[in-house]
Amino acid sequence: MFKNIFKNKKPIPDSVDLIQEASHNSEDTKLDRTLKQKVDRRNAIKGLTAGLLAGTGFAATSCSSMSSDKDKEAAGLKWEEYFQKNYRIMTGEEKRETVKRLERSYELQHNVKINISDTGPLDNVLYGYAFNISKCQGYMDCINACIKENNQDRKSNMQYIRIHEQQNGSMDFAHADDNYYHMVPAEGNFYMGTQCFHCENPPCVDVCPVKATWKEKDGIVVVDYNWCIGCRYCMAACPYDGRRFNWSTPEIPEDELNKEQHYLGNRPRMKGVMEKCTFCIQRSRKGQLPACAEACPTGARVFGNLLDPTSEIRWVLENKKVFRLKEDLGTEPKFWYYMD
Amino acid sequence: MKIIPYILSLTALFIIGCKGGHHESNISKVTKHNTPIQYMISSQDFIIEDSLVKAKVADHDIYLRDRKNQITSFECAKCHSDPLENIASKQGGKKNSHWNIKLNHAEIMACSSCHETQGNLNQLKAINGTPIDFDHSYQLCSQCHSSQFEDWKGGAHGKRLSSWTPPRVSYTCVECHNPHSPKFEQRMPSRYLVSDEEDQTLNEEH
């Protein structure tokens, strides 16, 4: 199936060019024009329906003398949320407004103040990741750190990272165990972590019918949760099982909520949207390591800038034996495995 | 004669088609990018330690947390005012301090393999007797573990502290490995999924 998809692909452009292109063409691509048209229509509908809405449930809430000011404000903010643009075509100001509205909306609903960032990509940075399969001991500390950092649903045991226990001398994901519970490392086994690989040529992005997922300039593949319609095409297209779906409204214990958030990262998700690893966009764009890399007690996780010739990730790529999963698909994951 | 332009254009198409089909992977181009990067952010924003030491290694700028401030009973000479032989003879073979240290690090090692036991006890010593500062204990480890040391210098072994941006602040050997028992222990994983059947079927993708 994937062969067909990739047969029709255009030649993959150079990544550095891609980066420059992205900054030049952001206004004029065909995609953006389409998106803009759509938004114009949405705005028109928004204007029309707002006028016609007297008498509907929403209007009843906002006009009723029974409901408090807070309820009215919350309903108003929710209303605006339905009509917000695709994050990718928002101007800087619109992004800031959106983020503020979402913060306020969350505060009204949960009585908790959160801080949502809209920090953009850093210049001359392309994130890459390397995983040492000789070092990973299968402790799974990374998974716990990831769940906490990224406010993942506790009820459905959502986890972006999986650690696969594999038998020495084989690499067979069908028979690998990613839910073991015994003393680790177990004799005769090695451990291999998978998560979103942030492909340079991501099939998940190609299949999204509403352009709710895309690759940022710094190489991180992100999802606009407000734009996602939950069709799960991306989940089916990902050859690496990197994407997760919210079958129900995510539940996070109040005292465990990470309040430092990013619009494209760990802000609370809704029911019916996709999510996945973002290389901890809320941390990495500030300069911090992703939570998994920081939590790993064995140093099996290396994260850094692929464009920086002095970075450790570059040293690993140039000096160690590295491989990626399903390289023949041409997806170009920015996630390498290496061994001592 | 009329057929020649067709043949020519077909050949041209074939050549163009081939060129379009074979391209160098864009990632391999990226990883040849050799211009130094100027960063607007710095790892120092996340590292609150006030005393970092620069590792004495060639070709790499690596900063480490100062070690001597973290050792609880440093300086050793505060207790060890007498030479070790004198203390040993008084104790009659019994261990009164450092009783909790069990050496589980290669078979032939003894305290004196790494620690200075005569003269200045506040420092470590290399195989050839050269004193080594506690802050630079990686020099000691690298005498035997040379391949690990190469990997550590490059960044394939060990890990960064908090941030991926320069300047590089890394953990030193003994922050992850107990030097007296350096092997990582077996233990239970830190989580186990017990999902109910309904969730299981929903999340099973194939």
Image: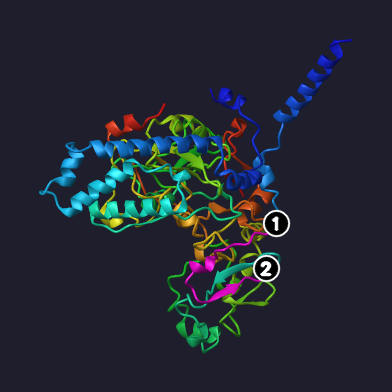
The picture places residue B101, in percent across and down from the top left corner, at: 46, 70
Whichever of callouts 1 and 2 sits on the residue coming sooner in the sequence is: 1
Q: Residue at x 56, y 69 (%)?
A: B64
Specify few, some or many for label 1: CA neighbours under 10 Å numbering under 14, 14-19, or 20 or more.
Answer: few
Classify A284 as above or below A159: below
Q: How is the image coloured?
A: rainbow
The answer to whether residue B185 shows anywhere in this view is no
Q: Observer-nearest residue: A132 or A103?
A: A103
The picture places residue B61, in percent across and down from the top left corner, at: 64, 67
Disc number at residue A209?
none
The residue to which callout 1 is attached is B35
Q: Observer-nearest residue: B198 or A238?
A: A238
Chain ID for label 1?
B
In the rendered image, residue B198 lying in the magenta stretch gets the answer: no
Chain ID for label 2?
B
The picture places residue A241, in percent across and down from the top left corner, at: 46, 35
Classify A126 as above or below A242: below
Q: Quadrant of the N terminus of chain B?
A: top right
Q: Amino acid at mark 2?
A: Val
Prevailing secondary structure of the magenta residues: loop
Disc number at residue B57?
2
Q: Quadrant of the C terminus of chain B?
A: top left
Image: magenta residue range: B35-57
Q: Observer-nearest residue: B53 or A256?
A: A256
The answer to whether residue A223 shows anywhere in this view is yes
Q: Is residue A5 left or right of residue A226?
A: right
Q: Amino acid at mark 1?
A: Thr
Specify few, some or many for label 2: CA neighbours under 10 Å numbering under 14, 14-19, or 20 or more.
Answer: few
The picture places residue A197, in percent across and down from the top left corner, at: 52, 42
Q: State whether discs 1 and 2 lie on one chain.
A: yes
Residue at the far bottom in the pictured view = B81
